[in-house]
Amino acid sequence: MPGTTTEDTLADDPMAPWVRGLAATHHDKFHEDGIKCRGSISFIDEEARLRGAAQFTLGKAISLERVLETRPEYFTEQNPKAIDFNVEVGIYGRSVHGGDVVQYNAHGTGKTHLDGLGHIGVDETWHGGVPASASETDEDTMVNWAQHGVATRAVLLDIPAVRNAEWVEAGEPVTAAELDAAVEAAGVTLEPGDALLIYQGRDRFEAAGHSYPSGAKAFPRPGIGEEGAKWIAEQNPGLLLWDFHDARNNAQGSLEVHSLIFAIGLCIIDNCDLAAAAHAFREANVSTGLLVAAPLAIHRSTGVLINPLVLY
């Protein structure tokens, strides 16, 4: 298995043994010699797209993107400046021209973004044994995913509804049993290539005055831990969209679900605003839709800001 050494131990290996095991199993089952693995997006085939299109029956659309506030007076501790954004306006007689200059960090806990395979790695490699140094030259995951077409069935899993709670609490990671219960409540059978929309109540959490901490700080926070990560991997989803991230409820303080980027090539869209979709789906008595996520085709990109849409 590329990236694995016999000297790895729990003490010094950033990937837990169970992550290494998943990586080895995935490699044996899905990797072909001479063919670069494209991870979970490979599960989105014609059947998955048609399954998604069949859910689009009411002609409605919902954006899952958190708003990127650029007006300084609206910056707060809970809504800090997310991007460097400058508007250039030129007035030439009666003609006016406007342009934008934008710079951003594609990751973090504030911006809705899609993680590429070049985001989480180990032993100087990304998923599939691609050298980390490729990100300095020609890493092409985002180009490939953009051209592949990320459109598939979306299945909304409402965890607060299962818990009868407002949001997922820190120290109480989402369990496999709760995920199974959410699938049962949705009334669907998951299929490979589906988009999992895992709603955990972040909107209510933040409305109550709480801030969601950065993943760079290794302490427990609301989210999904090892048990939930293993459950996600078992479903072979096309991608994961969520509001809370990894629970970091482990001795190493490692990112349980984000580690799946390395292990199985999981495509993740972080910081989704799933509250509107959860409400609209309840009102329409549906639990599925057509998920469309179109990343920018940028060579070497580790992640891009994105506006995922769910149509139902």
Image (cartoon, rainbow, N blue to C red):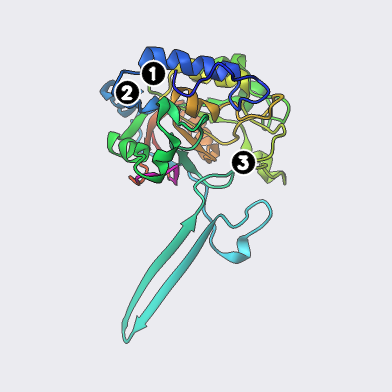
Q: Are marks 3 and 1 in contact (CB under 8 Å)?
A: no
Checking the image for residue 48, the label placed there is 2
- In the image, the segment drawn in magenta is 299-306
Against 73, residue 128 (above or below) is: above
Q: Which residue is mark 3?
A: 203
What SS does tag 2 mark? helix
Instruction: Tell me where residue 212 appears, x and y as whole percent.
Output: 66, 42
Q: Are marks 1 and 2 in contact (CB under 8 Å)?
A: yes
> What amino acid type is highlighted by mark number 1?
Pro
**On-image quarter of the N terminus:** top left
Residue at the (63%, 19%) spot, across then down: 9
Measured in 3D between alpha carbons, the distance from the residue under mark 3 to the one under mark 1, in whole angstroms, is 29 Å
Res. 227 in view: yes
Residue in the foreground of this view, choosing between 196 and 21: 21
Measured in 3D between alpha carbons, the distance from the residue under mark 2 to the one under mark 3, in whole angstroms, is 30 Å
Res. 61 in view: no
> What amino acid type is highlighted by mark number 2?
Ala
Residue at the (40%, 24%) spot, across then down: 194
In the rendered image, the residue lying farthest to the bottom is 93
Q: Earlier in the sequence, mark 3 or mark 1?
A: 1
| Residue 301 lies in the magenta-colored region | yes
Q: Which residue is mark 1?
A: 192
What SS does tag 1 mark? loop
Q: Earlier in the sequence, mark 2 or mark 3?
A: 2
Checking the image for residue 221, the label placed there is none
Instruction: Tell me where residue 144 appears, x and y as whole percent.
Output: 31, 36
Residue at the (34%, 35%) spot, across then down: 145
Left or right: 35, with 60 as reference point: left
What crowding class fits label 1: few (fewer than 14 Cα within 10 Å), some (14-19), or many (20 or more)?
Answer: some
